[in-house]
Amino acid sequence: MGKGVAITGMGIISAIGNNVTENYDALINCRKGISRVENIETVQRDEIMVGEIKFTNDELIAKLNLPPENNYSRTAMLGAIAAKEAIANAGITDIKKYKTGIVSGTSVGGMDMTEKYYYKYLTEKTPQKYIESHHAGDSTQKIAEQLGIEESLVTTISTACSSAANAIMLGARLIKSGKLDRVLVGGADCLSKFTINGFKTLMILSDTYNTPFDENRKGLNLGEAAAFLVLESDEVVKAENKRILAYVKGYGNANDAFHQTASSDNGDGATLAMEKALKVADLKASDIDYINAHGTATGNNDLSEGRAILRVFGEDLPEFSSTKAFTGHTLAAAGAIEAVYSVLALQNNVIFPNLNFKTPMKEFSMIPQTELKEKELNTVLSNSLGFGGNCSTVIFSKEA
Amino acid sequence: MKKVYINSIASISPQKTYDNSMFLDKITDYNDTVIFAVDPDYKQYIPPAAARRMAKGIKMGVVASKIAMDEAGIETVDAIITGTGMGCMIDSEKFVSAIIDNNEQYLTPTSFIQSTHNTVAGQIALGMECKAYNFTYVHSAISFESALLDAKMQLENDEAEHILVGGVEELGDHTTKVHRVVNHIKPEPVTISTVLNSKTEGAVFSEGANFFVVSNEKQESCYAELVAVETFNTLPKEKVSETIESFLIENNVKVEDIDVVVFGNNGDVDFDTYYNQLSESNFSNIQQIFYKHLVGENNTVSAFGVWLGSKILKTQTIPKIIKINEIKIPEIKTVLCYNQYRGQNHSLVLLKKC
């Protein structure tokens, strides 16, 4: 235990940029990607703000050079763009040289097309090609197809907003156990009427910019994004003389077992997830240099997560921030987006600001890092918490 | 590395399989293109008020998990891992149609809350008050095998002692209609005896839940040793045979060591050839069995194949209704399950007598 798994490449597309460089630039310049929704026709348009990627589906099709008869959901296209960047970033030119798999997280899957053509499927021929794109695994199959990954382990996890964090966890275990030499891990989720209206009915969508960990937080902004990391075994790293960006050092998963959608008051699940991750990493809480919190800016999450962080870190609380004010809450992709940000933080020794924060929460005195801060970082802890009580923590480190 | 054992099983399917003391003793025939699971007495396991709020998939998952836990004789587990290819269809359909029908107005959150793929695993955890590792795999026909592989790795590495693993799928009316349009469902009603030779496209769609307690200690109740699980996103027809051979070699098993092979034939004229080519060559002298004529096709029905394999290894009997050929076997020691759906997402599961 304790030995990390090497990250050798990463790729991302989010509301603040179409690749890793653009995302980093937005993060250090405090440029958020929250706006009114443009690509989806919804009556909620003026009541919500979202973290939307401004490319239309046609523009994404053109970017990926897909044939007109393709049946890619938006989730699959966003995923393919991020995955291709990750593979290129890892300097992989021959995907078949090593046993390579994919583990992706998604919650929306092909719901964007299903909600568009729901009744039309029964009467119109043209949209019927999307029927097979509905199920969550289809987006991952498409990403594999884009990368030329064949006859291999390709799977999908859906644990709501912790999906991509869990994908990273499984990927690390697949490498450690020798099942794969190389694995692409991450997640993708597009905006949809389904999630917009779903979260609206739960009354946890903010009508303005989301404000994580603020006393007056009004809820989350939904976002869309995809991000992937390439994990490689020590053997491949050695044989190919690979550049290592960072390591997946620890991971923990627990269930809050409290309520289908709400987190427990004391954040039992999140506490357990962080404790397990520290144990796998063989680190103490005081060894963590920065916490990239889940921090969705809902009343429930920030209180529960905040308490959990206090339970684990107590007096040793390092700087923490949520980057959701930049990107919105990208649901199943969030864990991968924030994994990329955690690696960027380690590489550049910077802590990204928790934007829009004004007033500390009355329940505790935790104040997030609100300005960009330079600090020597060796370890970053990232939380992802979701519906169904799913709580996940991943720890990233500079050293193995 | 520790060995992994299937210590208990549970199946809710279109056959009356939820009673572990029976083994396909009484078969329910049908003449249809879509078949539903036979309901156990849910009240016995779930308080009626709670059951009313649950869609069928949640109920089946919760009850199958309880049957498996009871048989294993344990109160809690170190992980709950489920697989579901299509997820909670009934609540998803409710919410999508409400959005469209009411133009995004007057919506209530219940169906949205219950539509997420991890609802079943979450409800099982809630019911057991189990704060352990909780995962849901959603990758079409290998959703269950992904869950099984995850469990197996944790048990082998001694990260867990007992894990509840299962696959669950429910039918949704609209989804069924939609799949009919693209001929994924058979055009004409078929029966148990006609489905395999129907010579038509599509399958008989179905639903069900199959759960198992897998552990790294062998219990009294043990059904089988889980030797290996492997999945493939793609596999050309002409490479199936060699892929199975190398899978067996990796696990130190020869083709002739296999006593029973469990095939996933569903009567789809376009895709049964994946199995038929094996029936006629590599496995022609081996006892072949099938099950989708009894329980239909769904994304996690391959878990029923593992259920069958486990049951056969423990009872050393093979019901006639699932036999493709007739081979005399003195002792059933090794079982191989092979499944794919529409030519994609292939899986191999190797079981041994424990």
Image: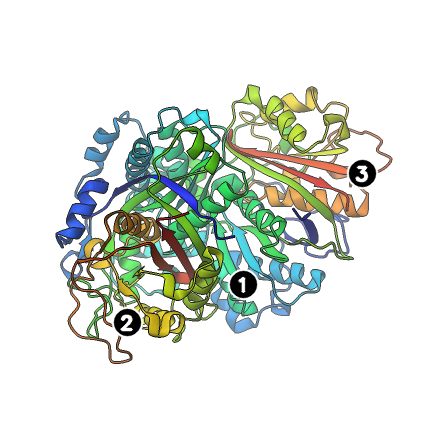
Q: Earlier in the sequence, mark 1 or mark 3?
A: 1
- For the point 45% across and 71% down, the residue is A258
Q: Secondary structure at mark 1?
A: helix
Check if mark 3 and mark 2 are on a common chain: no
Q: Which label belongs to residue A360?
A: none
- Image side of residue B125 versus residue A106, left or right: right
**Distance CA(mark 3)–CA(mark 2):** 58 Å
Crowding at dot 1, Cα within 10 Å, few <14 / some 14-19 / many 20+, comes out as: many
The quarter of the picture where residue A226 lies is top left
Instruction: Reply above or below: A314 against B38.
Output: below
Please state which amino acid type lies under the numbered disc 2: Gly
**Distance CA(mark 1)–CA(mark 2):** 26 Å
Q: Chain of mark 2?
A: A
Q: Nearer the viewer, residue A169 or B27?
A: A169
Crowding at dot 3, Cα within 10 Å, few <14 / some 14-19 / many 20+, comes out as: many
The label nearer to you, 1 versus 2, is 2
Tell me the residue that label 1 is attached to. Answer: B124
Q: Which label belongs to residue A299?
A: 2
Please state which amino acid type lies under the numbered disc 1: Ile
Q: Position of residue B202 (x, y in %)?
A: 52, 32
> Can residue A16 be seen here?
yes
Q: Position of residue B163 (x, y in %)?
A: 60, 56
- Image side of residue A205 versus residue A139, left or right: left
Please state which amino acid type lies under the numbered disc 3: Ile
Q: Which label belongs to residue B332?
A: 3
Q: Position of residue B207 (x, y in %)?
A: 55, 48
Q: Chain of mark 1?
A: B
